[in-house]
Each structure stands twice: as C-alpha cells, then as structure tokens.
C-alpha cells in the first residue's frame, strides 16, 4: 500500500460541510451518535461537531499515523479497519464518511449492520455508481439507497496530481425491508460550490485547523427541508 499517496488524499472541507449540513437542514437529521468509519485526519469529525455539537462522535481509522487527529476530532476512536470494528453492540443513529473505493460495498453492508433501527448510512461515492453499467448497480439491488445528493461540479481529493470526478452523497436507511421499497431513489442536486471549494488546497492536514471556509462557503449552499 502506498501510504504516503493515501495520506495526501483529503476530502475538501466545504464539500463535507455542505453535505452534512444538508443532512441536517434538508433531511432534518439530528443524530445523538455518529460514526465515521474512515476517519483519516478528522475532517468529518470536525464538521459533525459544528453541525451537531451534542452528538457523540466515534472515528475509526486503520492508519496509526492519524492517532493525533483522531484524539482531537472525536469523542472516541479506534485504530483499526472498519471491517474489524465492533463496539459492544452499540448501534449508531448515523454512519457517515468518504470510504475507500475498494471497500465501498463493504462499508454499505457494515454500516447498515451498525446503524440503529431507522438509522442512516450516508457515504460519498461516484455519481456514476447509480448507472446500470457499474458495480454499484448490483450493490443497489441488495441495498437500495433512499436518495442521493449530487455535488454539482467535479471534486478532487488529491493535494498533488489530478483526479477529478463527479460525486454525490448516497443515502441509505436501516428501516424498510428491501422487498417493500420502491425500485428507485430520490436524486437532488446540491447548489454548486465554487471550484476552489471542491478540491483540497494547502499542505496542512484538514484535521489540524478548523477552517473558516466551512462557515463562509458551504453553509450558504444547502437545500430547503424535505420533511416537515
């Protein structure tokens, strides 16, 4: 595994802020317990603290080099792979992260297993995974999403190089049996963020400094409530 390369891939803070704020303001989610199963250097933990300050935040991350960031951005953390993580039967109101591509399907399955009844699993992923020609099509036959929130404009996670793609937030719920659900999901377009907000800029890991870009950029770009 090329650890150095992976350490240079970060989810842009404004992208996380916009998506999580949309969960609060559009889907009206107000979780008491939140699990970030691919915590990295803690950008999701920082945003969770800002959006839901009373929520208990748990981060899981296998790279031991991220321990400082986990301690400072989560109420509890575990240095291990999410596939091996157990929390003494604890079930979470929300499981939310940007998972590794190669583990995306496993994160959906494990996330739903760790979500409380009625709980939510929200993962960043390629928008194209909803098409019939991708591996996501087979996954969605087994675990159908409730909705997707599309990020308008390509996103880049890398601090070096170029890897820009179209992403969205895939939303699942641990509730209705699969055979009783509709065969489709709701798709909503999030308001477009500035191009500079859709890529990581700078050399400081996002978990070290709680940037003002969260408040000044992404909070203005959310949708009205879908539920009363």
Image (cartoon, rainbow, N blue to C red):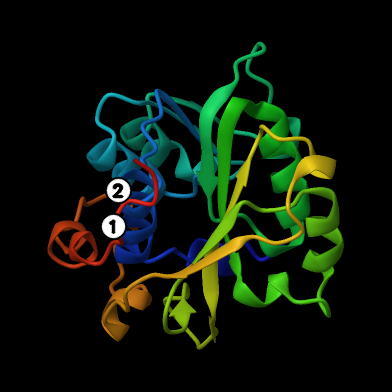
Q: Secondary structure at mark 2?
A: helix
Query: Is there any visible trace of residue 212 in the rendered image?
Result: yes
Where residue 51 appears, as percent x and y from the top left, is 26, 41
Marker disc for residue 25: 2
Which label number is shown at residue 105? none
Please tell me which residue is depicted at 34% across the width and 36% down the height of the picture. Answer: 73
- Residue 200 quadrant: bottom left
Residue drawn 79% across the image and 41% down it: 180
- The residue nearer to you, when weighing 11 against 121, is 121
Spatial CA span between label 1 and label 2 = 7 Å
Of marks 1 and 2, which one's residue comes earlier in the chain?
2
Q: Nearer the viewer, residue 223 or 13?
A: 223
Residue 215 appears left or right of 165: left
Q: Secondary structure at mark 1?
A: loop
Instruction: Judge from the rendering whether residue 215 lies leftward or rightward of residue 162; answer left or right.
Output: left
Question: Can you give x and y, in whole percent of width and height, for residue 167 in the image?
Answer: 54, 73
Picture coordinates of residue 71, whole percent (x, y): 38, 31
Q: Quadrant of the N terminus?
A: bottom right
Q: Label 1 belongs to which residue?
A: 224
Residue ranking furthest to the top:
88
Picture quarter with the C terminus: top left
Who is closer to the viewer here, 36 or 8?
Answer: 36
207 is higher (above) or lower (below) than 205: above
> Relative to 134, is 83 above or below?
above
Q: Quadrant of residue 118?
A: top right
Q: Nearer the viewer, mark 1 or mark 2?
A: 1
Whether residue 81 appears in this view of the structure is no
């Amino acid at each position: 595994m090329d650890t150095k390369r992976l350490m240079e891939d970060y989810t842009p803070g404004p992208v996380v802020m916009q998506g999580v704020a949309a969960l609060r303001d559009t889907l009206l989610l107000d979780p008491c317990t939140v699990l970030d199963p691919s915590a990295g250097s803690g950008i999701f933990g920082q945003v969770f603290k800002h959006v839901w300050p009373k929520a208990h935040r748990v981060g899981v991350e296998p790279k031991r080099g991220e321990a400082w960031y986990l301690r400072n951005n989560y109420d509890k953390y575990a240095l291990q792979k999410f596939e091996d993580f157990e929390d003494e039967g604890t079930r979470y109101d929300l499981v939310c992260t940007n998972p590794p591509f190669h583990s995306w399907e496993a994160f959906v399955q494990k996330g739903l297993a760790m979500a409380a009844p009625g709980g939510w699993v929200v993962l960043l992923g390629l928008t194209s995974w909803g098409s019939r020609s991708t591996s996501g099509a087979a996954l969605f036959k087994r675990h159908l999403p409730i909705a997707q929130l599309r990020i308008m404009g390509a996103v880049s996670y890398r601090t070096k190089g170029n890897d820009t793609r179209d992403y969205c937030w895939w939303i699942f719920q641990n509730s209705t049996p699969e055979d009783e659900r509709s065969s489709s999901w709701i798709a909503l377009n999030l308001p477009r963020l500035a191009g500079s907000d859709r890529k990581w800029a700078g050399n400081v890991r996002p978990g070290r400094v709680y940037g003002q870009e969260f408040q000044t950029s992404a909070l203005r770009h959310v949708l009205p409530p879908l539920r009363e």
